[in-house]
């Protein structure tokens, strides 16, 4: 009996020691993966859907492949998690493989504590931190609670800057619509822009930690100099492009809590009306949507003119606060249905149609030369 108990103790101790070793290796690997991760990624194969000549590919098709890739490989890209970090590494590699140089790309790292004066967001964040400490929940948070924005600068003839943004993190699901669709739109645009002579300087910004409370975009605008703010012509945000068949553009600037228009938003309406007829698109203006909760809000509060792109379900647009309106117009976001394979099976051709139209619209917006009272195409 004593021998049997001795053997049991030895076996139990061995199993416990093995568990400690596995845990230690896991912790060491996670910590090591944070140290200089963006200094050693530039020669890896991204595995993304690059094409040699995007001019021969129909608009939206490149974006669709990116959505599938992110859906299947980088699902559950939770804010401040290792999965989110791995997605950021992939984004940098993808931009490099397109043909952009390291000097074109900036990795802007931040912690949630570095975004100033956002106490309500801190409380929200503490809830997830508490959840992550539970033995029943593993959100995959990095010990540093660090995230990052990926910024690609495409120089133009003018120092005026158009910021095009999309967040790449998600909640617990694949996040095809929210927001692999927005990321894919930017990636296709950046790939096509390599062969285009653009007038304005374009900054493609892939924001981290949006789902936690717009942390990436708030950090981005908070760290701009006064001169950099002055150089921003406008900001375009792409978020939730596959939730419905209605393709909305939400444009304006904030005038003491009310949506207002200027020569840029008027030019956007002219562009949308023109390409709706010329290219058989279905773009719908929704001015109140500038207050929808997404990364463009960070620019709105600094006085910038913005456009938010969204594909929603709105056979009849409900009344009420804009957040409730948007909530009532989504069908897959923040649910297991936010999966490109479910979307393609349930609504055939919707993803292809939406990405084609948003890709065409975005390129028109980026290549237009805006003047004080009118606009002309470059």
Image: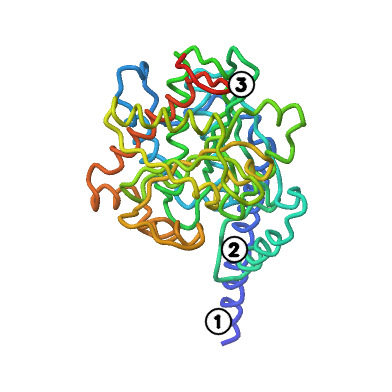
Asked if the residue at tag 3 contacts the one at tag 2, i.e. Cβ–Cβ closer than 8 Å, the answer is no
Of the residues under marks 2 and 3, which one precedes in the sequence?
2
Q: Which residue is drawn at 52% across and 52% down?
A: 292
> Which image quadrant for residue 276?
top left
Mark 3 closeness class: few <14, some 14–19, many ≥20 residues within 10 Å: some
Q: How is the image coloured?
A: rainbow
Mark 2, secondary structure of its residue: helix
Q: Which mark is residue 104?
A: 3
Distance CA(mark 2)–CA(mark 3):
44 Å
Query: Is 277 situated left or right of 11 in this image?
Result: left
Q: Is residue 332 above or below residue 235?
A: below
Mark 3, secondary structure of its residue: helix
Query: Is 233 situated left or right of 56 in this image?
Result: right
Q: Which mark is residue 201?
A: none
Q: Give the labeled residue for mark 2.
A: 19
Q: Is residue 40 above or below residue 195?
A: below
Mark 1, secondary structure of its residue: helix
Of the residues under marks 1 and 2, which one precedes in the sequence?
1
């Amino acid at each position: 009996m004593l021998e049997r108990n001795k053997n049991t103790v030895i076996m139990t101790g061995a199993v416990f020691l093995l568990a400690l070793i596995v845990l230690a290796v896991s912790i060491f690997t996670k910590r090591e993966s944070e140290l200089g991760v963006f200094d050693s990624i530039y020669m890896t194969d991204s595995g993304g859907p690059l094409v040699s000549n995007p001019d021969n590919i129909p608009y939206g098709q490149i974006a669709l492949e990116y959505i599938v890739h992110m859906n299947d490989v980088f699902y559950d890209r939770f804010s401040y998690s290792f999965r989110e970090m791995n997605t950021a590494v992939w984004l940098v590699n993808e931009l490099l493989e397109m043909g952009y140089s390291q000097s074109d790309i900036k990795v802007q790292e931040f912690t949630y504590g570095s975004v100033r004066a956002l106490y309500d967001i801190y409380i929200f964040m503490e809830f997830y931190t508490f959840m992550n400490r539970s033995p029943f929940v593993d959100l995959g948070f990095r010990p540093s609670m660090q995230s990052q924005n990926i910024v690609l600068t495409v120089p133009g003839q003018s120092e005026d800057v158009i910021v095009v943004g999309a967040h790449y993190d998600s909640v617990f699901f694949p996040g095809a619509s929210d927001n692999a669709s927005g990321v894919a739109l930017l990636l296709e645009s950046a790939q096509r822009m390599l062969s285009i002579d653009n007038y304005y300087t374009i900054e493609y910004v892939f924001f981290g930690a949006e789902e936690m409370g717009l942390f990436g975009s708030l950090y981005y605008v908070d760290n701009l100099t006064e001169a950099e703010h002055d150089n921003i012509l406008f900001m375009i945000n792409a978020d939730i492009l596959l939730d419905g068949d209605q393709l909305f553009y939400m444009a304006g600037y904030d005038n003491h809590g009310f949506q207002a228009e200027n020569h840029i938003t008027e030019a956007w309406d002219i562009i949308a009306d023109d390409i709706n007829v010329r290219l058989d698109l279905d773009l719908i203006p929704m001015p109140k949507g500038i207050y929808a909760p997404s990364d463009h809000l960070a620019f709105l509060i600094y006085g910038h003119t913005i456009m938010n792109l969204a594909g929603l379900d709105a056979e009849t647009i409900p009344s009420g606060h804009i957040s409730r309106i948007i909530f009532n117009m989504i069908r897959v976001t923040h649910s297991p249905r936010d999966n490109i394979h479910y979307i393609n099976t349930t609504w055939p051709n919707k993803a292809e149609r939406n990405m084609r139209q948003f890709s065409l619209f975005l390129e028109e917006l980026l290549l237009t030369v805006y003047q004080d009272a009118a606009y002309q195409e470059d």
